[in-house]
Amino acid sequence: MSAEYAVTLSKFQLGDMSVEYILAVESQIVGLRLYPASMVGELSARRELSQTFEVLLQPKSNPPMRAWQVESLAQVKLIGDAVSGYAQGSTMRNSETVLSLCYAGQEILRDGTQIEIVTTLRSERGYACEHHLIYREGDESFTVRTDFRNEGTVPLTLEMLSSFSLSGLTPFAEDDAPNRLFLHRFRSHWSAEGRHHRESVEDLGLERSWSTHAIRADRFGQVGSMPVRDYFPLLAWRTALPGSSGARNWHGLAPGKWRPTAAMRI
């Protein structure tokens, strides 16, 4: 078995974007990260272990603390399953439901100028998730959706199923990019212009704790039929680097509710 914590499962260039699937070797959890194809030369190797002052003061008998972990590209929660890291009431990400989802295969479907990458995750508990990433040649974005399938005989009740989940922000720093990672969003109301807000991870309270424990999350959006209420359905991450910048964007409009979560897995 490989001594590496995680390896690249597959990598694709879709237009000017690079899409990389990351596989955690032992747990078989699959993560997803994106970055501009033109910036591949600026990718940084992540530090594997946390070596902060507080961590170094811990007893030598304590197990080493990982500095990063692969987050599943499919985020789902069944009623009755536990959440992790004191996340109760804050987010349902990385629940017990997700932790048992293991890599079960990846299929590439092509139809003319369209490519669809289907990644299947399966649990021994009798359910599976299919992650679909769809790109059409010439587009400046792609579509992501997640399908949940009950493969057992016992009824299951979903409490949460995300459309998509990105991790590995930012791939341009070996550490947590302190004071360099910013969230951009636009506050507004129906039939009003948007007011641009730019907030750092630190201002949002998403920085990691010294013990690398407990989840940090900022959940926002709107509930109801209005596509714009409190916030425009646009979220962008930007990493400030000397001489360059990297951005993560998603956008969409829909006559329904949308509630993204900006989170730091500690």
Image: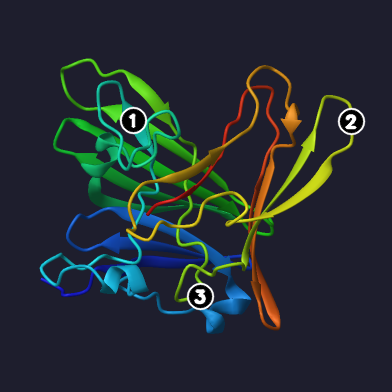
Label 2: element kind: loop
Left/right of residue 219 with respect to residue 213 in the rendered view: right
Quarter of the image for the C terminus: give it.
Answer: bottom left
**Circles 2, 1 touching at the beta carbon (< 8 Å):** no
Question: In the rendered image, is residue 65 in sight?
Answer: yes
Expressed as whole percent of the image width and height from the top left, the position of residue 1 reads 10, 71
Disc 1 crowd, CA 10 A, few/some/many (<14, 14-19, 20+): many
Q: In the image, what residue occupies the spot 60% across and 30% down?
A: 258
Asked if 75 appears above or below 26 in the picture, the reply is above
Task: Answer whether labels 2 and 3 touch (C-beta < 8 Å).
Answer: no
Q: Which residue position is annotated with label 3?
A: 173
Badge nearest the viewer, 1 or 3: 3
Query: What kind of residue is marked 1?
Result: Lys
- In front of the other: 203 or 255: 203
At horizontal 38% and vertical 36% (from top left) the residue drawn is 87
Residue 77 drawn above or below residue 123: above
Residue drawn 17% across the image and 30% down it: 126
The x, y position of residue 32, in whole percent, is 43, 57
Whether residues under marks 1 and 3 lie with C-beta atoms below 8 angstroms apart, the answer is: no
Vertical placement of 245 versus 208: above or below? below
Distance (Cα) linking label 1 and label 3: 31 Å
Q: According to the image, label 2 marks what residue?
A: 192
Q: Given the image, on which type of amino acid does mark 3 rest?
A: Ala
**Image spot of residue 71 (x, y percent):** 36, 52
Question: Which one is earlier in the sequence, the residue at label 1 or at label 3?
Answer: 1
